[in-house]
Amino acid sequence: MLSSRTPSLMRREYKVVRVSAAARFALVISIAWLFSGAQAWAEGGGATSDTAQNFLNKICGEFGVANCPQLPTMNQVVIESAAISGATPSEIRGPNNMNLNLPPGAVFDAGTQFNPATGNGLSNPLAFITSSGQSPSPTQPNNPAANSFLSGTTSPTNGDPTTLNLTFDYHPRTLGFEASQEGVNIGDIVLPLVVANDAGSASPSDLSIPHLATLEIFADPKTCPTCVTTDILANLTGAAQTYQPSQLGITFSNDNSAPGANNFSPNEQFTLGIPLLIPADLQAAYLFSASGHEFTSGLFDGINPVASFLDASFLDNPGNVVTAVIADLAIAFDGSTILSDPVSTQEPSTLLLFGSSLIGLALLYRRRLLTR
């Protein structure tokens, strides 16, 4: 059901003093402080250094985010800092900021973000080499061994997006499903969702630990050899519940262009459209607003714009469950997308964050005035 809020509540109008990506990045440089001796845990260890979180806290403060997300991994801190500031993840990791000194191939980024100040940016897709029983190995998209891809875009493209579009392009599955596979769970996609009320307010904990909703995909060969059905398992209101995607405003499609054929054309591909929801606590840092989807009276769900874990598993042709994607996702302040695989190598035990003085902060700080 579409939002029942009045137009004035559905979209808050702002007069924006727009600060360029160059100015945002200059601000990031100016607020980088010299820290040393802080323990930076390895990715996957379940923690990130206080130093890195302090770096993100400072960015949140300068861009008006009152309840700064407290993020569990270094990679999420990196891409969230990039999302708010307008810098790319590689710039956040670089010598002017976190100075992580990661070796080539330790991390790969994708998405739609572009920094006109430097000419650097991101492009889709994020690529992996997958095989049964192994964690997906991130790689360059042009690597011939890459066989699983994730792309993320937002729409519409008029600067006021309302939907995140995710496409999973999974090459190991080319065959359709046999009659004996009717109802077999052939894929799971984990989505980080946030829930807000009709004023746009979400729980502060949602900004750091979103609701992880699992979209389940089931084979439906009775309908056609490449047909599937779906549902979503999620705890959005205090109790686990099964939803149909449409109940949460989510659209789903799979590569089903030749339903009479016994195989996919050329391989299995799933596309999701997920409503964007920018909570009130984050609105000061964003150039657009997005209300999400009203899934029950007075409550709205949507993809969490804060850097969060995203993964997907699918069946290959022999019928093995293969982890196809392990990624972090963030929605940037301008509606662009940032995808990044979690850093697989141990991160440095000491972070050195370099920065210049805070002179000129007042000239760079973006102010927003609510117009009535």
Image: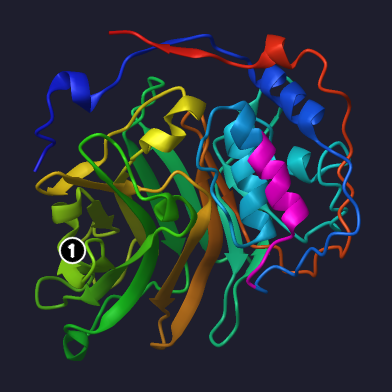
The residue under the point 16% across, 20% down is: 7
Q: Nearer the viewer, residue 58 or 193?
A: 58
Q: Which residues are magenta?
A: 46-58
- Pinpoint residue 197: horizontal percent, then vertical percent: 23, 43
Q: Is residue 99 left or right of residue 279?
A: right
Q: Is residue 223 visible?
A: yes
Identify whether 140 is placed above or below 326.
above
Question: Residue 203 lies in magenta, yes or no?
Answer: no
- Pinpoint residue 99: horizontal percent, then vertical percent: 86, 47
Identify whether 133 is placed above or below 359.
below
Quadrant (top left/top right/bottom left/bottom right) for the C terminus: top left
Q: Is residue 179 left or right of residue 32?
A: left
The residue under the point 52% across, 34% down is: 65
Identify whether 205 is placed above or below 8.
below
The residue under the point 74% across, 60% down is: 49
Task: Give the quarter of the image for residue 20.
Answer: top right
The residue under the point 19% across, 53% down is: 248
Color scheme of the displayed model: rainbow
Which residue was labeled with disc 1?
259
Quadrant (top left/top right/bottom left/bottom right) for the N terminus: top left
Q: Is residue 312 left or right of residue 230?
A: right
Is the magenta region chiefly helix, strand or loop? helix
